[in-house]
Image (tube, rainbow, N blue to C red):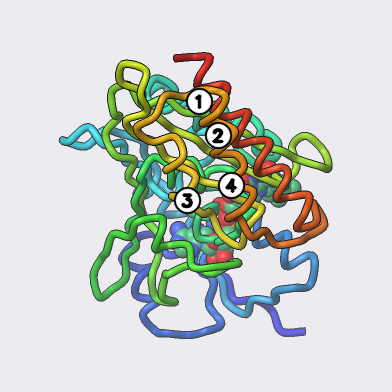
Amino acid sequence: MEDTVWMEPDTLQGVKEILAQGDPEIRVVSGGTALSLIMKQGMFDPKKMISLKKVKNELSFIRHDEEQNIRIGSMTTLREIEIDPLMKAEQPVITEALAHVANPRIRYVASLGGNLAHGDAHLDLPPILMALGAKIKVESSKGDRWLELHDFFQGYYETAMESDEILTEVLIPKKIEGLRGTYFKYTTLSNDDWPTVGVAVFLKTVEGIVADVRIVISAATDKPTQLPEVEQCVRNKSLNEETIMEAAQKAYEVVEPLEDLRGSVWYKKEMVKVHIKRALEQLKTES
Ligand SMILES: Cc1cc2nc3c(=O)[nH]c(=O)nc-3n(C[C@H](O)[C@H](O)[C@H](O)COP(=O)(O)OP(=O)(O)OC[C@H]3O[C@@H](n4cnc5c(N)ncnc54)[C@H](O)[C@@H]3O)c2cc1C
């Protein structure tokens, strides 16, 4: 068996130069938690790997920019985000969700960049970040570009990144005063398993009327998916039993789930309905 070539450039520029060679056998490694799993399962046998270990300092940060957006470097680990005071103060839904992602051992090494670049629909952060309107920066030797999360996720394990690009940063827009949210992770196997259904709901009410609402689901579908038809059921209305039921029923009708070992199409439709209802009820109670 051929040995895997392991490369450890010590600058981001060095990583981009290797990727610019356009070798289809090359794969970037951040924490390696997702990659090692698919390698163990025999689904992937990389010939060349570029470790980002030596560029961790360049790509590891959580800070405000001048517009008060939160910027997170792609090599920041899930654990670093989970315990970050700025994140806890401004986006506690992320802090709380991370406490239930995998287990501490994985969170200490898994990176935000790897989490998103993996393109797996069964992850907990993507629906929350999408509901918050997050953007992703990808870089290559040709330059950089920013992508909305909606455009970044293209399908099952598919993203809009080109093979010579590396994900370097995530931007969460400035906190909107009054926008409240929740994330429901529903699992059918162990408690810390990948979700069967993930539901992120953020909304803002003004004098009892829903002025802003974002509803995103994951795990049930092939990629994190915002549900505008469901949002429409509560937007500019009061959150009450009737509007909440209408939204939950609409979700049941419009979501087209993928069957997998965590649930059938019918079951996932039901679980999306149940958890959108619960998320809206929770936000109603807190208002
Ligand atoms: C047992 C187990 C349980 C888990 N449970 C959950 C869960 O409940 N919820 C959840 O959300 N997640 C869960 N995860 C997933 C975990 O969050 C991901 O494995 C992790 O986030 C991936 O990050 P990583 O840094 O290890 O990525 P890696 O394994 O290093 O990389 C993953 C993919 O992204 C690419 N990549 C990595 N970094 C970059 C970059 N900067 N630019 C471009 N491409 C890049 C790699 O080439 C690879 O294709 C679980 C994982 C394990 C192993």
Which residue lies at the image location 81% right of the left edge and 42% below the top edge?
A: 188
Circle 3 is placed at which residue position?
226
Kind of residue at badge 3: Gln
**Mark 3 and mark 2: span between their CA atoms?**
26 Å
The local secondary structure at tag 1 comes to loop
Q: CA distance from mark 1 to mark 4?
A: 33 Å
Residue at 51%, 22% in the rendered image: 240
* Mark 3 vs mark 1, CA separation in Å: 28 Å
Disc 1 C-beta below 8 A from ligand 1: no
Residue that carries the numbered disc 2 in the rendered image:
79
Q: Does residue 31 show up?
A: no
Nearer the camera: disc 4 or disc 3: 4
Residue 81, above or below 117: above
Side (left or right) of 138 relative to 126:
left
Mark 2 lies on a secondary structure that is helix
Q: Pointers 1 and 4 in contact (CB under 8 A)?
A: no
Q: Position of residue 31 (x, y in %)?
A: 58, 52
Q: Are marks 2 and 4 in contact (CB under 8 Å)?
A: no
- How far from the left and from the top, in percent, is residue 118? 56, 61
Q: Which residue is mark 4?
A: 251
Name the side, left or right, on which 63 lies relative to 164.
left
Pointer 2: residues within 10 angstroms few (<14), some, or many (20+)? many
